[in-house]
Amino acid sequence: MLTWIEINKKNILHNIRQFKNLAPKAEFWPVVKSNAYGHGSKEIVAFLKGNDDVSGFMVANLEEALEIKALTNKPIIVLSYFDRENTELLEQVDSQISLPIYDLDTVDYLQALNKDILVNVKIETGTSRLGFRVDEAKKAIEHIEAKKNINIFSIFTHYAESEAEDQTFTKNQLAIFEKATKDYKKYKLHSACSAASIALPESQGNIVRIGLAFYGLWPSEATKRRAWMSKMCLQPLMSWKTKVVQIKQLKKGDSVGYNRSYKCTKDCKVVVLPIGYNEGYSRLLSNSGEVLIKGQRCSVRGNICMNLTMAEIPNDLDVEVGEVVTLLGQDNGQNISVEEVAKQCQTINYEIVTRINPNLIRKIV
């Protein structure tokens, strides 16, 4: 095994306790879509399947739901979409899985399948994405309630900017949602993602949907600051590691990698790592990223290749082939955070972790 992801089990349990303290009256449902934000959905679900603080799991689509269904008896909410024409997948849906509903044609289609199906009614309150308009909500819910085989499990919405400093728009969305659902409290109501659960405790509802923050990553600096003010501390779950596969002595003037984008300014020592943009290590880190070797920061040299990356190490650093290299995480007091890498790549932390190749081994440690 040359490249792998480690998930810290102590930090998983720590983060769950932090959110249970934050929202003691709400159910805790980790969002494990997109391979658990790159952390490994199968590994996360298998580890949490017996955890009493976890009431269920949330995914983006039906394929993801069916993938983890074999690993847990806990209920699974599909948040975004499913292919209603794929009857082979729909035939596998049972009471453990509830599907999203945001148009009446889909309700009628599901009814025609003549099987009991649980659904989650999505109300659109300000993101202009999936969901019934507020003025359609009452009619839609009544339409669903009239169907013999279709039963509502929950009603929910999404916030557009709950991670922002200014919570005015989020508070307005919450007010709209509460007004639209005031007559339907017999169903589970949920709107709070990680950021909203921290910024607006009144949004926590029956279920808290914890996504990015469950993995110890902050949706924004504003969210992080609010959490700290509430004495809430989260720990990152992920470390990303690889191994040295070759060590090279280079001379001043030698070039490194494709397009010769780096030329050695002095005699130096370079290690070759079996990691590249195929594995999810962004090409934007070419000549700018750093890795950790024996607790020392070492600069990426040259363009990152599809499957290889080169990094310069100090001439006096004793490194052998097989030496462990940290791409994300801590090593002997040094740390490369997801946020640091995201800033270098001019993107958000969500993208860095979700783009890690799902074929890489994830292991709970």
Image: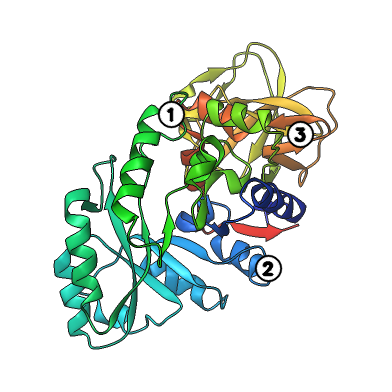
Q: Earlier in the sequence, mark 3 or mark 1?
A: 1
Q: Which residue is rendered at x = 62% and y = 59% of the image?
A: 361
The numbered dot on residue 52 is 2
Amino acid type assigned to the residue bearing label 1 in the image: Gln
The residues tagged by marks 3 and 1 sit, at their Cα atoms, a distance apart of 42 Å
Amino acid type assigned to the residue bearing label 2 in the image: Asp
Residue pointed to by mark 3: 293
Q: Which quadrant would residue 117 be assigned to in this image?
A: bottom left
Label 1, residues with CA under 10 Å away: few <14, some 14-19, many ≥20: some
Label 2, residues with CA under 10 Å away: few <14, some 14-19, many ≥20: few
**Quadrant of the frame with the N terminus:** bottom right
Q: Which quadrant would residue 107 be assigned to in this image?
A: bottom left
In this image, 101 relative to 171: left or right? Answer: left
Residue pointed to by mark 1: 167
Amino acid type assigned to the residue bearing label 3 in the image: Ile
* Above or below, comparing residue 187 to residue 216 in the picture: below
Residue located farthest toward the top when viewing the structure as drawn: 265
Q: Earlier in the sequence, mark 2 or mark 3?
A: 2
Q: Which residue is rendered at x = 25% and y = 53% of the image?
A: 131
